[in-house]
Amino acid sequence: MVRPAPNIRQVAELAGVSVGTVSNVLNRPELVTSHTRERVQAAIKELKFVRNDSARQLRLGRSRTLGLVVLDISNPFFTDVARGVEETANREGLAVIVCNSDDDSAKEASHLDLLAEMRVQGVLINPVQESDSRIAMLRERGIPVVLFDRQASSADECSVAVDDVLGGRQAAAHLIDHGHQKITFLGGPYSLRQIRERHEGALAAVRDLGADVSIDVLSTSAPHVGAGRTAGDEIAALPATERPTAVFCANDLLALGLLQALTHAGIRVPQDVAIVGYDDIEFAAAAAVPLTSVRQPRQKLGRTAAEQLLDETTNPGHRHQQVVFEPELIVRDSSSGTR
Amino acid sequence: MVRPAPNIRQVAELAGVSVGTVSNVLNRPELVTSHTRERVQAAIKELKFVRNDSARQLRLGRSRTLGLVVLDISNPFFTDVARGVEETANREGLAVIVCNSDDDSAKEASHLDLLAEMRVQGVLINPVQESDSRIAMLRERGIPVVLFDRQASSADECSVAVDDVLGGRQAAAHLIDHGHQKITFLGGPYSLRQIRERHEGALAAVRDLGADVSIDVLSTSAPHVGAGRTAGDEIAALPATERPTAVFCANDLLALGLLQALTHAGIRVPQDVAIVGYDDIEFAAAAAVPLTSVRQPRQKLGRTAAEQLLDETTNPGHRHQQVVFEPELIVRDSSSGTR
DNA sequence: ACATCACTCTGAGACGTTTCAAAGCACTGT
DNA sequence: ACAGTGCTTTGAAACGTCTCAGAGTGATGT
C-alpha cells in the first residue's frame, strides 16, 4: 500500500525525458514545449509525484518557511498578528512555523536553534529579552530577523512596533479627562518592555495633564486573565474610599479578569470603577461591559513585519527600518458611562 | 559579514577527524571517545556550526516537523489544542507547522499540498469536509494523518474527538432541569459536523426528558462573536412572550456575542434569558456574567492526537484507534441564577 | 553547401548529511 | 609470534533536487 514516494527520475523515465526537463516543467515551465510539458504533467499525475522539498531546499540553500516566535499563543493579540503574517507568507508560497516561547528564554532559545537548523528564510520574533546572542547568531548566518511589537534598539535591524508609550498616554489622558484622580495601573511582569512603556506613557500623561492625579501600581505576575481576577479581588477588598476610581490595565486579558472580579463583588463598572484595557482584542468589545481599550493594528503589524522580512530576503538594496504604528483609543462603556 | 554556513566537513577538518565521526558526535555521541568528542565539540563551537536540517531530512527521508491544520486560529479552542500538540511535539524535538484553513477547502488543500512537499512526519487535521481525497493521498504517501475534534468514519484511521452529541445533550438537559421550556439552539453553518452533532444532542435530550419543551433553531453564518451579536439583536427584538427563556450556543464565541447584545438591550442574563455555551474557553469564565459551558479537554485533545501520530510513525505495531473523550458541563451564573 | 541562430533538451555535478562495511588499533590469551 | 576480540574511526555511497554548459535540431540567410 505504502510505496516510497516517486522521485523526479521516475517521472522523467515515464515521460521519456530527462530529469532536467522535469525540473524545468516544475520550475520554469515557459522553457519547455507545450507538447513535452503535457507529457511530463501527465506522468506527474499518473505517479502522483510530489516534489521533495528537503532536496529542493538543500540544493537551493534555503527553505520555504518562515519562523514566528510569539510570547503567548493563547493571547488573541498574537493570533491576530499571526494571521497577518500567514496571509503575507502564504501569498508568497511560504509556510509559517509558529513557536510559542511562553515568555521563557530557554524555550525561546530552543525554538531559535531549531529554526536555525531548518534554515528558515527568516524569523519574526517578539523577543523575551532585550538583546539575545542567539538573534545575533541567526543574523551572522544570513537569516534575517525582524522584531515585532518591540522597537529595535539599533538602526541595523528591522522592527515593527506600536508606540506603547503613546498608547499608555492615550489611556491615562482619557481617564484624566473624565475626571479620575485616583488611578491604578495594573500590569506586570516589568521584565516585559511593553508593560513598562505603557506604564511610562500613563505617567507622562499625569505629568502633563493631571496636577492632582495619583497613579498607583498594582503589579501582576503575568498578564493573564487569572492575574486580573486576583487583582480585582484585592481592589474589591479595599474600603471604598481607598479604592481607585479607574484602573488602566496593561492588556485586555487583565482587564477582563478585573472586570469579572469587580462585577462579581458588586462593584459597578464604570460607575464605581472605570476600566481601560490594552490591545482591543475581539473579546474586549464582546465583554458584557464592553471594554474601552487601546487598539493596536494587529494584523497590519504581522503583515508589515512579514513584508519587511521578504524585502530583506529578496531585495538586495534592502534598508532596515524601524516602523512604529500609532495605537488608537477605542472608547466603550467600561470607561464612559455617566459617573 | 555573512559567510556561508560551515558544514560538517569543515568541522571535521578543524577537529582533524572524518565527517563520519562528526556525524556520530552529533547523533550517537556514545560511540565516540570522550577525547575525540570534546575536540569535535570545540570545533563546532568555534565555527558556530549549525546542522543543516534539509540535508538531514533528505538523507533520513522524513522531516522533523508535524503539520497541524485548524479551522480557525483565532478561536481560543484551537490555540489550546495547538498548545497540547506543541507540548508533545517539542518533547520529541519536533516543530509544529500550524496552518489555518479558515473553513475553506481550497486553503486547506493548498496547506496539505505544502505539507506533503515538506514530507512532514504526520498531519493533525480538523478537516473542513467529511472526506477528502487529499487526505487519502497523504496516507498513500506514507504520511499518517490523525483527525482531531472529529471522529473517524472508518476503523483504519486515527481520530481524537469529544462526544459532541453528548455535550449537546448535557447542555440541553441542564436547561430542561432548570425548567426551561422554550429553548433556542444558536449555531451554524450546518456544514460543520460539530455543530450538527451538538444540535442533535440537544434534540435527543428534549426527546428523552422534556415532554413540553420546544427547541427552535437560530442559524448563523459562522460561529463567531459577530454572528452571536447579530443573533442577540434579533432575539432582543422579539416580543418578550415569544422570546426563548434559554439559548444553547454552538460555541462560546457565539455565546459571548449573544450575551453582549442581550445585556446591551437590557435583557438580564440569566433571569430573562439563560445562556449555555460550548468549549469553555478561558473567556467564558471571564465574561462579566460567567458562562455556563460544555468543557472540552482541549489540551488533552491536542496531546492525545500528537501521541497517536507519534505512535503511528514510530511503533510498527501501531493500531488505529478512535478516541472519544467525554465533555463536561461547567455550570456558572449565565444559566443558574435564580429565575 | 555551409554558417548562424534560436530554441529545446540533456546529464553530470553539487548541495550537506547519515549510514555502514571495513579498516585500524591496542589488548589478551595461547 | 599470532589469532582473536572489542572498540574507535574512516570514507564512500546515497538521499532527490536544481543548475548550467553544452549537445541536438531545424530553420534561415548567404
Image: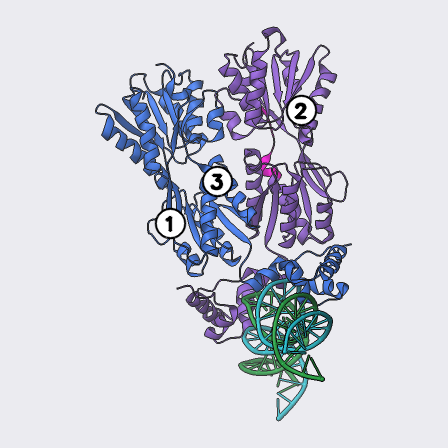
Chain colours: A blue, B purple, C green, D cyan
Q: Which of marks 3 and 1 is in front?
A: 1
Q: Which chain carries label 1?
A: A
Instruction: Give the residue furthest to the top.
Output: B241
User: Whole-percent x and y of residue A327?
Assistant: 38, 34
Instruction: Name the image quarter holding the C terminus of chain B.
Output: top right
Instruction: Name the image quarter holding the N terminus of chain B.
Output: bottom left
Is residue B327 positioned above or below B157 on the image? above
- Given the image, on which type of amino acid does mark 3 rest? Val
User: Whole-percent x and y of residue B233?
Assistant: 55, 17
Q: Earlier in the sequence, mark 3 or mark 1?
A: 3
- Given the image, on which type of amino acid does mark 2 rest? Gly
Q: What stretch is highlighted in magenta?
A: B293-301
Q: Does the magenta stretch include residue A62?
A: no
Q: In which quarter of the image is residue B280?
A: top right
Left or right placement of residue A86 versus residue B116 in this view: left
**CA distance separating discs 3 and 2:** 33 Å
Q: Name the residue under label 3.
A: A81
Q: Name the residue under label 2.
A: B168
Local packing at callout 2 (Cα closer than 10 Å; few below 14, some 14-19, many 20+) is: many
**Residue B335 appearing in the image:** no
Q: Which residue is drawn at 49% across and 47% down?
A: A68
Q: Which residue is drawn at 47% across and 56% down?
A: A313
- Given the image, on which type of amino acid does mark 1 rest? Gln
Left or right placement of residue A200 versus residue B272 in this view: left
3 and 2 marks on the same chain: no
3 and 1 marks on the same chain: yes
**Residue B17 appearing in the image:** yes
Q: Mark 1 points at which residue?
A: A321
**CA distance separating discs 3 and 1:** 19 Å
User: Whole-percent x and y of residue B148?
Assistant: 66, 39
Q: Quadrant of residue A50?
A: bottom right
Disc on res. A142: none
